[in-house]
Image: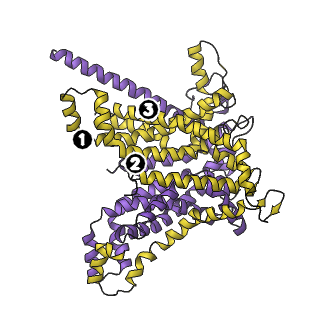
Amino acid sequence: MTSASPFVRSVIARHPSGRMPDHNFRYWIIAPSVFLLLLIGLFPLIYSLVVSFQQITMTDYDTSFAGLTNYAQLFDDARLWQSIAHTLIITIIALPVELVFGLAMAHLFLERMPGRQIFISLIVLPTVISPVVAGATWRLLFDQRYGPINQVIGWFAGHEVVMLWNITPHLVYPAILICEIWQWTPFMFLILLAALSNVDKSLTEAAELDGAGFWRIFFKIVLPAIWPVMAIAILIRGVDLFRIFDVIWALTSGGPGTMTETISIYTYVQGFQQFESSYTAAIAFLIVGLMSVIVIWAIRRMGLAK
Amino acid sequence: MTNFSLAATRRWKLACRYGLASLLLVFFVFPIYWLFIISFKTPDEIFHFPPVWYPKSFQFANYAVLFKDGDAVSVLNSLILAGVSTVIAMIFGTMCAYSLVRFKTGGEDFAVWVISQRLMPPIAIIFPIFLLYVYLGWVDSYGGLIILYTAFNLPYVIWMMRGYIEDIPLELEESALVDGCSRWAVLWKVVFPMARTGLFATAVFTFVFAWNEFIFALVLTRTEVVTYTVQVTHYFGGQSNFWAKIAAMSALGTVPVFITVSLLQRFLVRGISMGAVKG
């Protein structure tokens, strides 16, 4: 194991024992990081597991062993499965839209044009804003009376419109999705633009001379070339969308009722508003377990860990 | 095709591209414009129907209120939490990344585990952490949040610095060792200075992530270390939202991010793509 690194070998050969025991140095320098990573990586997992087998609620601090009661409850909890469904709906719509929209924008800005850099610098601004601030901004924009969105829709409709974007059931999802897509399309755009600029021009030009059409070139040459980068962008966004919290918290707080409650919002409500400690721990363990499997599979699959 | 018509087509195409680009610019920038413009409006202008698209005069009363009431302290809290946690995460993370690159410590599995921590949903880890912090009395303290922010940003730092350290030529470190430098001296005097560009770029993004963080701060702060993101949500009421305060506080928290990111354009892609795109 040690001898795998040529660096280690060369140094052992040339540098007899220094002031520090050399063979332990590599463990000394990872120790602080490993300690902190265990705090967020291992401790929550073990602690959730322990608490989830107990019966701690707001009124009753009951630490006796309760078996799988809390896990059995997971299956009967319609609100939990609805929140997972809400999360998936948002992910399934937002992710492809951001990807396709971002890719189209990247194509638009691929060729040089005067002022291109200024356009790009301004368009990427939403991505660096705090998601909570993004949600708050859109809440102001969507206001039924003092926001500009209803005003503009009113211009087109020819009369005043009153659309309650964060209350009306059929408008809350469009509102969340618009905000989400507004904030993260530039993320996809910027990464895909960089990936597209790195595609070998001579290949696409040769294919063009051979008479291949735009789509054929795109699917046969461009897509395979940008796929490694695109896969990572999809992974990052997919995981982010699955844990979406801030934007919804600022826009609807999960309402109306529980209509826009995502898995993160629901866990928060259970843990910090209803104080169902043991049950929340069971949910947390479920999420960590599920995500660990998916994420590690995806990382390996996409060759991210080179 | 004549030269003339070729040139005309090209001009027409360019005009189309500018047209589309301008539409996109409006869609992506207008909301930000609206947020900032509200922060300069008077109450009459904010609650005017139909909405006013630009204020008659720029006035800073909305900002003055934040400073007078002491709410602006939340920006300072964000600065302290993000700043201190970034410095610690950079030092620990770079050391760890160095061990990963040069000694292959833990191998592939360790690296995969590290990056998978970055992708965990905060909600799943915050609940057990909260119970631990209540037990230790760390809720609503700088120390507690700094440790959590440091830990949560470490995977990102390790991941990014791994890429940057791989670019440092091995010969420099070897010759320093042969010259009698200790391992620690090599780390401090060769690796850190050589990786300074990467250190700087990574630190800025780590800082921005911590600066913009919401859910940990929401759960773990009460009154003492409230960050600006939590402060913004305090202004939402059932019926009456404090619009001027929402806008001004959001602007205070957003301007520093805009300035830093604009200065660092060339690192932006590598920074947000977790190193997937270099250059």
In space, the residues marked 2 and 1 are separated at their CA atoms by 22 Å
In the drawing, does residue A275 fall left or right of residue B99? right
Percent x, y for residue B185? 36, 78
Percent x, y for residue A98? 47, 36
Q: Secondary structure at mark 3?
A: helix
Chain given the colour purple: B
> In this view of the protein, which residue sits in the foreground, B46 or A84?
A84
> In this view of the protein, which residue sits in the foreground, B25 or A232?
A232
Q: Residues within 10 Å of mark 3 (few under 14, many from 20)?
A: some
- Residue where numbered disc 2 is placed: B268
Which chain contains the residue that carries disc 2?
Answer: B
Q: Amino acid at mark 3?
A: Phe
Q: Amino acid at mark 1?
A: Asp
Percent x, y for residue B1? 16, 15
Residue at the (29%, 30%) spot, across then down: A216
- Residue where numbered disc 3 is placed: A101
The residue mark sitting in front, 2 or 3, is 3
Which chain contains the residue that carries disc 1?
Answer: A
Residue at the (32%, 41%) spot, across then down: A224
Chain given the colour yellow: A
What colour scheme has been applied to the protein in the rendered image? by chain
Are the residues flagged by discs 2 and 3 from a single subunit?
no
* Residues under numbered marks 2 and 1 in contact, where contact means CB atoms less than 8 Å apart: no
Which chain contains the residue that carries disc 3?
Answer: A
Q: Secondary structure at mark 2?
A: helix
Residue at the (37%, 82%) spot, across then down: A22
